[in-house]
Image: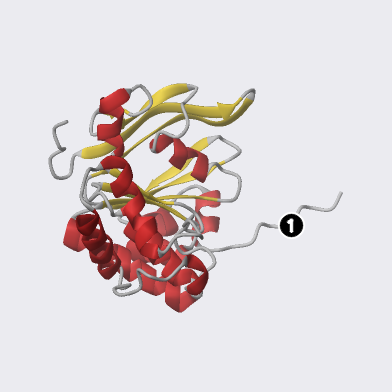
Amino acid sequence: MTPAAPQDAVIRVENLKTGFGDFIVHENVSFEVRRGEVFAILGGSGCGKTVLLKHMIGLYRPLAGRVLIAGEDIAAAEGERRLAILRRLGVMYQLGALFGNMTLAENIRLPLEEYTDLPDEAMDLIAETKLRLVNLGGAGHLTPSEISGGMMKRAAIARALALDPEIVFLDEPAGGLDPITSAELDELVLRLSDSLGITFVVITHELPSIFAIADRCIMLDKRVRGIIAEGRPADLRDHSPDPRVRQFFNRAASAPAAAA
């Protein structure tokens, strides 16, 4: 596959419809993610942020529409063609999803063991290199139960980086973290974006993180089953004509229902 040129769309979501049986989550969702940007997917609880992510990484097949990764339909691809697409992607799942019976280094080695024929020494070196990238150098011998929540998120990002992906998906990276640890994670994402040129797609509803790291975003709404806003976070906060968008970005409570 030919890499996209700078500022080209490395991901295109076209007329996507998702759901389970008769339950529809999204209808006619379209947007693009540009190479090198930090792109956030926002919205309230139940709007389908994680469902959308799982379609974008090929875990779910859409009911209609398609997701293109550098021009390739991830749901339609099979065999070696699908593996080539998946190697372009790294994923940090919500809560980290590290294997508790493995050390951090062993967790990072998993994608290398699955997708490469590298010798053990090379995989060990790569694991330590990725841990150093996320400020966890020397911690490879620890297990998930021996580290903090913030360290677990960073270790999960290190695993997502194992195969040197072009695109990394982060599902609620700041969820459950204290403000200082969350800010440190934001700084890590920005540093990796700047130094490695990685495109990040971040699923989040944490306002401080959105304003700190996101170049652009879309906002989903469960009532319309799709996108109600797209653009730069500050622009949406200050200028969106949609009261639902302004309410979200200004962290305003819903007005109480009028008495009968």
Residue 243 in view in this figure: yes
Residue 70 image offset from top left, x and y in percent: 23, 34
Judge left or right: residue 160 versus residue 147: left
Number of numbered tags placed on the structure image: 1
Residue 153 image offset from top left, x and y in percent: 43, 64
Tell me the quadrant of the picture where the N terminus can be found. top left
Label 1 sits on a secondary structure element that is: loop
Residue 39 in view in this figure: no
* Neighbour tally class for label 1: few under 14, some 14-19, many 20 plus, Cα within 10 Å: few
Residue ID at (26%, 70%): 132
Residue at the spot of label 1: 256
Indicate the colouring scheme.
secondary structure
Residue 146 drawn above or below residue 85: below
Residue ID at (33%, 23%): 78
Residue ID at (40%, 33%): 58
Is residue 108 or residue 220 the one in the foreground?
A: 108
Residue ID at (54%, 41%): 48
Farthest-out residue, right? 260
Judge left or right: residue 159 versus residue 37: right
Residue 229 image offset from top left, x and y in percent: 44, 44
Is residue 249 or residue 3 the one in the foreground?
A: 3
Farthest-out residue, front? 120
Q: Which three-letter amino acid code belongs to the residue tagged 1?
A: Pro
Judge left or right: residue 149 versus residue 90: right
Residue 83 image offset from top left, x and y in percent: 29, 32
Is residue 219 or residue 100 the one in the foreground?
A: 100
Judge left or right: residue 248 versus residue 81: right
